[in-house]
Amino acid sequence: MLSKKTKYGIKALTFLARQEGNLPVRIATISENENISLKFLESILLTLRKNGFLGSKKGQGGGYYLLKKAEDIKMTEVMRILEGPIAMVPCVSLNFYEKCDDCPDESKCSVHNLMIKVRDNTLNVFRNTTLADLANQ
Amino acid sequence: MLSKKTKYGIKALTFLARQEGNLPVRIATISENENISLKFLESILLTLRKNGFLGSKKGQGGGYYLLKKAEDIKMTEVMRILEGPIAMVPCVSLNFYEKCDDCPDESKCSVHNLMIKVRDNTLNVFRNTTLADLANQ
DNA sequence: TTTTATCCTATCGATTTAATAGGGTATACA
DNA sequence: TGTATACCCTATTAAATCGATAGGATAAAA
């Protein structure tokens, strides 16, 4: 299940990507347009800023804006920052690997092998989708 | 994230599929071999029985056994019973659809469109993998 | 009738999630 | 220089979910 954090984060990024001229947009504006709790959104945008996706300006005329071109923002990056692992089990995760307590031999584990296939397919989608793809539809 | 319930359920099914002759296997045997909490496994096997995957026999020589051939058990069915929706968001789920409160227009929602792609790919894996595939590796 | 093994419901502790509260800090502008 | 604006940051909380456990009921075999 995708967390609301990730869902709202992607929606906010898309909203910013659809702006003309990449001018700063207030949290409140995004919150109202996308029906997202303002304070919750605030913390999400903060995370995205700290991870280099967004820039911010304070005071009148301030807000958030994209730091990179939408074409250069891959969904893999966004997912890993907001959602964490892309894999469904830690033992097949590329970036968040963890061994299972049970499972003495990963190569013979049916769950492991099945989830590798799922991970590869999901990864393929995220790797080949940029924020620009999402914004242009 | 895959729940332990699903993980253990798939492991148990695989264990049963690997048995010779499809004789009943005690919960305790599966529990010991796969390092799964006995009582937790008990409830999982019960679910699988109530959903037509397993049969059971009580008393000495009893246990659980597959009701269908492993080749005829698709991962889509198993996942939907144990894990629930395959989709990452309810608004793209085929079997557990729910509209989002926010989102006035699904067709324009970036999350919606992205998650349809993920769902289709994941579905493809589960549709084309049977319990027999998992058991034979 | 005793042993074996599944059946079933209820509960519990820990963790995570989504959201909120409340004040701090920097910027713009009059 | 003062005031309004808007982001910054930490802490807390209510609810839900998850993994596991407890404890007895029921059915079959020996």
Image: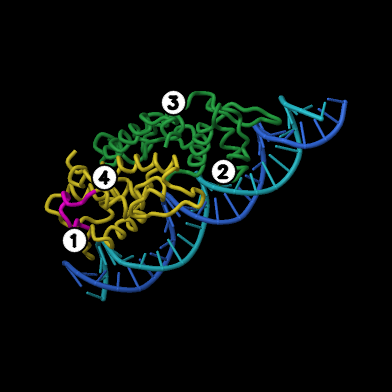
Chain colours: A green, B yellow, C cyan, D blue
Amino acid type for the residue under numbered disc 3: Glu
Name the secondary structure under disc 1: loop
User: Which element carries disc 3, helix, strand or loop?
Assistant: helix
Amino acid bearing label 4: Phe
Q: Which chain carries label 2?
A: A
**For the residues tagged 1 and 3, is the chain the same?**
no
- Where residue B45 appears, as percent x and y from the top left, is 29, 57
Q: Distance between the residues labelled 4 and 3?
A: 31 Å
Q: Residue A17 shows which numbered tag?
A: none
Residue at mark 2 to residue at mark 4: CA–CA distance: 37 Å
Viewer-side label of 2, 4: 2
Q: In this view, does B73 lie to the left or right of A130?
A: left
The residue beneath circle 3 is A71
Kindly report the distance in space between the C-alpha atoms of the residues bearing marks 1 and 3.
63 Å
Tell me where residue A42 appears, x and y as whole percent. 61, 38
Position of the N terminus of chain B, as image quadrant, is: top left
Dividing the picture into quadrants, the one containing residue A104 is top left
For the record, the magenta segment spans B61-74
Q: Residue at x 62, y 42 (%)?
A: A39
- Which residue in the protein does label 2 denote? A33
Residue at image location 51% in from the left, 49% down from the top: B102
Q: Can residue A7 be seen in this view?
A: yes
Q: What residue type is labelled 1?
A: Gly
Q: Do labels 1 and 4 share a chain?
A: yes
At a point 20% along the width and 51% down the height, the residue shown is B73
Q: Are the residues tagged 1 and 3 within 8 Å (C-beta)?
A: no
Q: Are marks 2 and 1 on the same chain?
A: no
| Viewer-closest of B39 and C27 | C27
Q: In this rendering, is residue B127 above or below A62?
A: below
Q: Distance between the residues labelled 2 and 1?
A: 63 Å
Question: How many numbered marks appear?
Answer: 4
